[in-house]
Image (cartoon, helix red, strand yellow):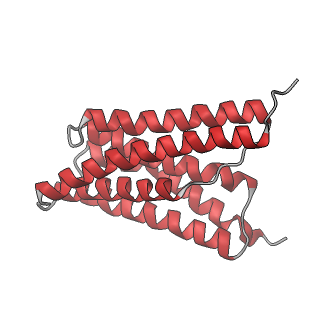
Amino acid sequence: MSNWRYIPNLITAARLAAVPLLLWWLFDGQFNNALWLFVLMGLSDALDGYLAKSFQWRTALGAYMDPAADKTMLIGAYVTLGALHLLPHWLVFVVILRDVAILAGTLTYNFATRRLEIQPTLISKFNTVVQIVLVVSIIYNQLEVVPELFIQTLIGLTLVTTIASGLDYLMEEKFKRGARHPEKPV
């Protein structure tokens, strides 16, 4: 098998390695640099996903590393923007709580079934897009004025989609457990 299949993993690793620089630039007020890096990181996520799917370059490592890099990037950005008082703390809490709940549900499911099969749902993908657009808008707002109504609408949409995707995921896991394991294991 060709070594080309590891290209998506290298792109993901670069995205993960760039997170500390993103956070530093945000804390340092280098919003122009942070904005471009965040956009580049988002594009790299799309690129590695495209390459993995289109050329069948999927790997077990990539299946774990890609969502970990995405979550590290987003949670890092949300916590930093919250610490800078650019995002409401309650929204940062809800975003983190959703991811902790999903992680706890995933670990519990894996422990109970010894199988870990995670597929993002449509609402979860939409939530990720909304979260990314909010971060880009907040950073861009430090450079140029973004209408307050737009920012508040994005904050509300982020809240709704974060809660909806978290509940959707937890309900789906409960359904999968019941459908695959109708009886308790001995």
Q: Name the one closer to the observer, 14 or 105.
A: 105
Snapshot quadrant of residue 111: top right
In the image, 132 versus 34, the foreground residue is 132
Question: Which quadrant is the C terminus positioned in?
Answer: top right
How many labels were placed on the picture?
0
- Residue placed farthest to the bottom in the image? 54
Q: Residue at x 48, y 42 (%)?
A: 166
> In this rendering, would 129 be left or right of 45?
left
Quadrant containing the N terminus is: bottom right
Q: Residue 9's quadrant in the figure? A: bottom right
Residue farthest toward the right in the current orientation of the protein: 186
Residue at 55 percent of width and 38 percent of height: 102
Q: Position of residue 173 (x, y in %)?
A: 63, 41
Residue lying furthest top = 186
* Residue 108 image offset from top left, x and y in percent: 67, 30
Position of 72 relative to 144 (above/below): above
Whole-percent x, y for residue 61 in the image: 71, 52
Q: Quadrant of residue 92?
A: top left
Name the residue located 69 percent from the left edge and 35 percent from the top edge.
109
Residue 171, percent across and down? 57, 41
Q: Is residue 132 left or right of residue 8?
A: left
Q: Is residue 80 left or right of residue 16?
A: left
